């Protein structure tokens, strides 16, 4: 039982470090190094965590301002929709 708790704690700690290490507005991207499509997807997936973290750290944003434009926006939007269950076309309907 105790090993399970330690294992879960290690996994949760690892996930927290993974999610907080790549948040928008952290200074990783600039005018010469712009965030692209896949960065937009990642930032869309972690948007709820970025929003909460932004309450405590004003440097963390939900959206990266130094981005490639349309492609970043497209990746961000796709991740927001699919990450929160907005794409229901592939879900199975409940049978009555």
Image (spheres, rainbow, N blue to C red):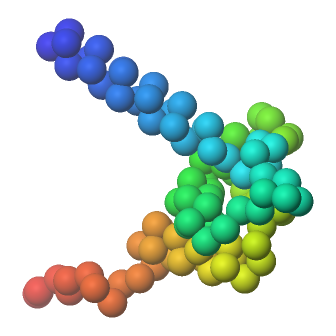
Front-lying residue, 23 or 96? 23
Q: Is residue 72 left or right of residue 88?
A: right
Residue in the picture at 77% in, 34% down: 56
Quadrant of the rendered structure where residue 15 is? top left
Residue 29 higher or lower than 88, as above or below? above
Q: Is residue 4 left or right of residue 82?
A: left
Is residue 16 among what the camera can see?
Answer: yes
Query: Image quadrant for the N terminus?
Result: top left
Quadrant of the rendered structure where residue 73 is? bottom right
Q: Is residue 24 left or right of residue 83?
A: right
Q: Position of residue 58 (x, y in %)?
A: 85, 41
Residue at the left extreme of this rendering: 96
Q: Position of residue 82 (x, y in %)?
A: 45, 74
Query: Image quadrant for the C terminus?
Result: bottom left
Q: Position of residue 57 (x, y in %)?
A: 80, 36
Is residue 54 among what the camera can see?
Answer: no
Residue in the picture at 88% in, 60% down: 31
Residue 6 higher or lower than 59, as above or below? above
Quadrant of the rendered structure where residue 43 is? bottom right
Residue in the picture at 72% in, 82% down: 70
Front-lying residue, 92 or 36? 36
Counting the numbered discs, the total is 0
Residue at the right extreme of this rendering: 31
Residue in the picture at 45% in, 25% down: 13
């Amino acid at each position: 039982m105790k090993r399970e708790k330690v294992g879960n704690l290690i996994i949760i700690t690892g996930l927290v470090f993974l999610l907080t290490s790549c948040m928008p507005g952290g200074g990783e991207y600039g005018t010469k190094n712009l965030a692209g499509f896949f960065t937009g997807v990642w930032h869309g997936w972690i948007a709820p965590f970025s929003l909460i973290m932004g309450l405590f750290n004003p440097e963390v944003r939900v959206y990266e301002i130094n981005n490639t434009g349309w492609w970043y926006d497209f990746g961000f939007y796709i991740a927001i929709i699919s990450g929160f269950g907005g794409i229901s076309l592939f879900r199975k309907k409940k049978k009555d």
